[in-house]
Image: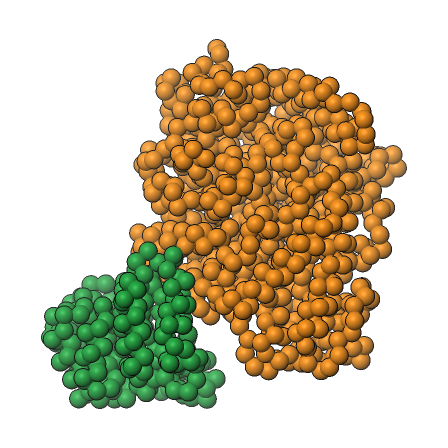
Amino acid sequence: MGRIQQIQSFSTLDGPGSRCVVFLQGCPVGCIFCHNPDSWEQSKGTEMPVDELMRRIERFRPFLPIPGLTVSGGEPLAQFEFTMELMRQAKAEGWHVALDTSGWGPAQRFKEAVTEADLVLFSIKHPLEPTLVSQVTVAGMEEKLAVLSRTATPVWIRYVLIPGWTDGPEAAEALKKMIAAVPSVEKVEILPYNSLARDKWKKLGWDSPLFHDDIRTDEAKVKEFEKMLEIES
Amino acid sequence: MDPWRGFKGDSWRNRVDVADFIRDNYQPYYGDESFLSGPSERTRKVWARCLELMEEEKRAGGVLAIDIKRVAGITAWKPGYIDRENEVIVGLQTDEPLKRMVNPWGGWRMVEQACKARGVEPDPQMAKIFTTYRRTQNEAIFRIYTPAMRQARRLGIITGLPDAYGRGRLIGDYRRVALYGTEFLRKEKEKDLYALDNVDDSTIHLREDIADQIRALERMAELGQAYGCDITRPAANAREAVQWLYMAYLCAVKEQNGAAMSFGHNSPFLDIYIQRDLDEGTLTETEAQELIDQLTIKLRLVRHLRTPEYDELFAGDPTWVTESLGGMAEDGRPLVTKTDYRWLQTLRNLGTAPEPNLTVLWSSRLPKPFREFCARTAIETSAIQFENDDLMRPIFGDDYGISCCVSATRIGKDMQFFGARVNLAKALLLAINGGRDEMTGEEVVNVPELTGEYLEWDQVWSNYEKVLTWLSVLYSRTMNCIHYMHDKYNYERVQMALIDSNPHRHMAFGVAGLSVVADSLSAIRFARVKAIRNEQGIAERFEIEGDFPCYGNDDDRVDGLAVRVLRYFYNSLSEQPIYRNAVPTLSVLTITSNVVYGKKTGATPDGRERGKPFAPGANPMHGRELSGVVAAMRSVAKLPYEICRDGISYTFSITPRALGEDMPQRIHNLINLLNGYFGSGGHHMNVNVYSRETLIDAMEHPELYPNLTIRVSGYAVHFTKLSKEQQMEVIQRTIYERM
Ligand code: SF4
């Protein structure tokens, strides 16, 4: 049984092509820029076995010429067994499976999951001080990057650009190095931050330091940062 | 010169059979759009003049001029022109562009209201004729309405009925005039007239109809003459074919102000003539495009005089000059021709506009370049709609067109009795409130009072069945009465002259508020719903405890409830006697009136507040489709087309980024969504690609967005022509995006 927050039947933003995305419930990573804070609480969501979930997404197949599934969250690795089983079954049914993760949990599990996936969407929270914006530690991050540096699974790096928090030149420099160390990186996505999730946080009675000044990232900032990384979008 | 030179086949020569002519002579086109041409100099000039006039019309508050002296009719006006030397295709409804006609056949009261709203006094002489000597459709209907019909109409349970305006919906086979000329058609009708004898009511009725049609054909020839076109004979070249076709349509819109005056499915037909001229070297591609551009200009100038009440229901002054494109032939060839591309090209050559209402009959077997061109055009313009050819062709054959918004009709073979729709949500509230209207407390129908604080599923459903049965009786009787009188006092002799003499008739019933009802029933069944009743015992609002599945998330529990309601209602309608033995069909369609219907409906058990808009057509309610567009499409595709043959309208809105990263991706993804939706049995889809910010900006700075066209249920409108309320409703709709 897994806990599902939501099934999104059509997305062009979570991996290649158009695909469906399963958001798993529960996330211990606590990012201050999180757009999906409703996914944090472990006990919410709907319980569902893998078969049932597969039945649901199978119905979307006629709309997806190359059936693609992204397992996202929440943090999928927080429901490790379920995530593994889901990936296995989906792959057996011919789905292209992407795992959207921040690499939470033991390195061994991470390695198993990465090997199982067809594509890993790996979020780097901050290359130098991840604890500034999340619960990810430097040690935790580094051991996951070490796993990625040895995998054949294609990797997309995702990075949320927050002015004043994650956009410094040192961060860019460090991030560039990290990316260079993972040979199977296919793409780097610099995601602009906006405060559209503020209402969701408020509803939960929570606050994020990012809400105090109206922070948002414009297109130009993203371009500039990409330049620093020497990548083109 | 022999007008039929070079044409193949025989069967169509001695009897009217345009479909056969097309089959024998059209050439499918498998290539891409690279052959297309821009607007000609003449087109540019004529269109520039039209834009000025439309600007003046807008400044004048929406109506440029009204001719109050003449009664609408085929030959009521002398010829009118926009820019005579540059007009390749001629003919206007009146003697000046955008001047509106007074059409009193439908009802004098409407003429008065419409004129008064524009600060014009109707002609007293005409008033006298149409109030003293000549009975109108509207007057006749209201004389025989029963008190129950008046009440249901007044309370908004049955709404938008064509009892005060022309029913429209008929598509004459205008191609017949181009292929055969009016003289041949007249003779064929005479044969039909004399083949019948006056045996009983229904044959006498039919014979009178045919006699009227013969009269119409004579008048049409007179109009042609006035414009220097001898339409009594077949068209001899492409320009004549387009001109004859348009002349025939023009006669229809000179005499009828039906809500929807659709144009048909003309591309393969016209393409035969254009191709022949191209082959003979008498026409260039630029000239071919010019014909379609100038025809389109004419179609964009069609106007009718409407009342403010009508405008509230059907916002943006639509005329539904629906033209169908694409589709597959029954022999497996695509019905796609170069002229299908030329129609789509008008959106570029003349700029985006709601009319004609371009409708692509979609099949997964359409040639790839055409699919891509259609998808790109939809993404760039938000002005076209798609319908499932693979679903309709087995029922209607391959020579059908879309009438009005979404209703398939065999060209020249079928006619429809348009019936607007009932408000299913109000019907549910009647079931909950012991048969009393929730807004006024009036007693409407006799059903048991519900007991208990909480709504019990069994009780509610059993009452709902009773209300729906009662409503199907009342609704069908109302329609019988409307169409009897419409036939009698406002008969569409022009369109009917171009349809077979004893056509197949559909009675086009409709429903609104389906998603509200599905979610309400779901809440009652799967959560607990407490009715908060006033001292009269009427539920004023509802408190919901617990979760329930909402329509639009591919959840069979609630989607099944929507289907169940449709089936129940359709089955009861089918048991009713129907005027002229018409076959009942059903639509799930609202046009823009989902706003008005919502206004007239109290709070509903799904949590929708009193007065709030419904979702358009068959759409899920705004903000409740939490599983993304594919899940929403799957839900809509479950509604059974076999009983909803009048059409199931779904409006899909997405931001450019959510559809894909760049144009090739967007085209690719849209094609997959269309294939997926139609492959799952979906019927119709409006495609809108824009961001909410654009709409908000357009609301604040309308002058910057004169051409912003959006698709609403079944037609397109200029966004800036909607009322503030309707604009807000469009903005609040689900536009698929991700933060
Ligand atoms: S890992 Fe994702 S879901 Fe978890 S807190 Fe961070 S952004 Fe939110």
Decide: is B514 above or below A26.
above
Q: Nearer the viewer, residue A157 or A45?
A: A45
Q: Is residue B78 above or below residue A36?
A: above
Q: Quadrant of residue A102?
A: bottom left
Query: Looking at the picture, how far across and down is residue A71, in whole percent?
Result: 31, 73
- Residue A179 position, x and y percent, is 15, 73
Q: Is residue B642 visible?
A: yes
Whether residue A170 sits left or right of residue B144 in the image: it is: left
Q: Residue at x 45, y 31 (%)?
A: B268
Q: Residue at x 44, y 42 (%)?
A: B347
Q: Nearer the viewer, residue B513 or B276?
A: B513
Q: Position of residue B502 (x, y in %)?
A: 68, 30
Residue B313 in picture, x, y percent from top left: 66, 54
Q: Is residue B572 above or below residue B170?
A: below
Does A185 sit above or below residue B69?
below
Q: How many marks can you see? A: 0
Q: Residue at x 71, y 68 (%)?
A: B462
- Taking the spot 38% from the left edge, 17% from the top edge, the residue there is B280
Instruction: Left or right? Give the position of B737 relative to A15.
Output: right
User: Which chain wears orange?
Assistant: B
Q: Quadrant of the C terminus of chain B?
A: bottom left
- Res. B562 image quadrant: bottom right
- The type of colouring in the image is by chain
Q: Colour of chain A?
A: green
Q: Is residue B691 visible?
A: no
Q: Is residue B333 left or right of residue B74?
A: left
